[in-house]
Amino acid sequence: MSIGAIKPLFTILGFIGFLLMPSRSEAIPTFARRYHTSCTTCHMTVPKLNHFGIAFRNNGYRMPQNDASLVKQPDVALGSPAWKKQWPKNGVWPGAIADRAPVSFRLLLDTNIFGSGPQPHLIFDMPHEFALYAGGTLGSGISYFGEVEFKESATPILSQAYINFDHLAKTPLLNLRIGRFEPIATPFSRFYRRLTSSDYNVSEYLAFSDPSPGSFRFTSRQQGIELYGARTGPDNRGGLEWGVGVVNGSDSSRDTNTHKDIEWSASYKFFGYGVAGPIRQEKEEDTKTGDNFVDDSIKVGVFGVSGRRGIGTGPTATEDRYNRVGVKLDIFIKRLNVYGAYVRGKDRIVGANREFDSSAWFTEADYVLTPWIIPLIRYEKTDVTEIAGRPQPQERRVVPAVNLAIRANVRLLVEGRFFVRDANFPSSLRPRNDGRIRLDFLF
């Protein structure tokens, strides 16, 4: 399928989106219900968080300031506040739970379009996924999040399930996460940043392609613990975000060895809204939804992971010792967001006397054409020196897409994925151009 063939599809879907332009926004998912506010308070469009949403997340799913006064669904206290005076000698510190089930749902309906090849050119995948989310706070100092994914002919997947111990030193600069989560070293999150259905290449590539379990990629959720935090800059703008974790290193229920992987990340934001909200109150805080996509700023960061995994079993078993190190850049200029990342990998196969390098990078630009229309384009390149002793071709891909927020909680995504051909690809392994139309409901 050529790029020209898909242009009419973008035009038609854009016109449909215009006819369905929202006249009002409704807050439905868990956090929107709790504060009686629109999803666009925290999101540019689902799932991409805006600057306010980042600060909300960094504060343990609480408003950066005046949280208690903004809550419209107060928690149910598990005991009298007087018990705090009895703790720790004569009582248990009282907690709190939501006054109703803190559950949200997501439904993804896909239509897949494929280029020339032996497979069908059009496939309905409806539903592609049904997901259940639970998230909230347990009084002061504890928050939680969980996600279960249901797909056709597949066992339900516990994608995320973790507890945060927030503000350990009475500051958002120090928090503890325990459970199953997206690693802090992930360059850009697939859960609260990515606007395409396809993952960023820097997150999903495998430098050593081996079928044994435990293969590392940033898209794999990890089990372990993380220390992390955020601190708004001294000028009440931007600030520092950091994190370090000890994790299994695999997406399986059990690791392939007793060695744990170390992952880390650090970034600094210049200008723009504070990464943990304002340090001092400059004006009355509210939850307005207008212009929440504008945040003139520059963020630079570094990230990495190092670990090992077992390869094979029995007398031929060996071990892959690997590391990944990268840099990232995130720039907002009015309605334009340009960002990208570069990752360098090195693997050493113990016992096989093999070492090889790999790298991947991407750059993406999206633009808020109107608050409900966000087109984007991404270019990405992956380069692996060898796999199983065979030189590998470079993989280059262009991903154009447009997101239409039909409602604050309903998104229409039209996406294409076009590969730049490399002559080194065997004809049987050449990737096919494809596209996807996705309808995304959250309720």
Image (cartoon, rainbow, N blue to C red):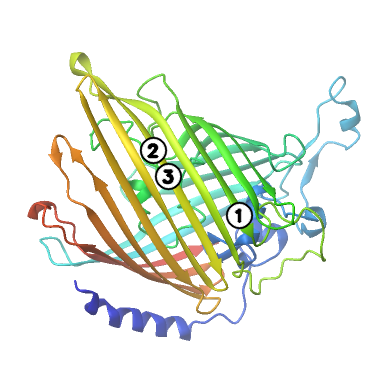
Q: Looking at the picture, how far across and down is residue 306, in whole percent? A: 41, 31
- Return the residue at label 1: 269
On the rendered structure, is 381 left or right of 149? left
Q: Is residue 317 above or below residue 135?
A: above
Q: Are marks 3 and 1 in contact (CB under 8 Å)?
A: no
Decide if residue 119 is on the left or right side of residue 108. left
Question: Counting residues from the N terminus, which is met first, the one under dot 3 or under dot 1?
Answer: 1
423 and 204: which is toward the camera: 423
Above or below — where is 380 with respect to 289? above
Q: Which residue is mark 2?
A: 324
In space, the residues marked 2 and 3 are separated at their CA atoms by 7 Å
- Give the camera-side residue of 372 and 306: 306
- The crowding category of the residue bearing disc 3, from other C-alpha atoms within 10 Å (few below 14, some 14 to 19, many at least 20), is many
Q: Earlier in the sequence, mark 2 or mark 1?
A: 1
Q: Secondary structure at mark 1?
A: strand
| Mark 1 crowdedness (10 Å alpha carbons): few <14, some 14-19, many ≥20 | many
List x then y, in percent, for residue 63.
Answer: 72, 55
Q: Are marks 2 and 3 in contact (CB under 8 Å)?
A: yes
Report the disc number at residue 326: 3
x and y percent of residue 139 in the render? 75, 41
- Picture quarter containing residue 88? top right
Q: Kindly identify the residue that appears in the image at 18 percent across and 38 percent down.
A: 387
Measuring from the top left, give residue 425's x and y in whole percent: 12, 53
* Residue drawn where x is 24% and y is 35% of the image: 356
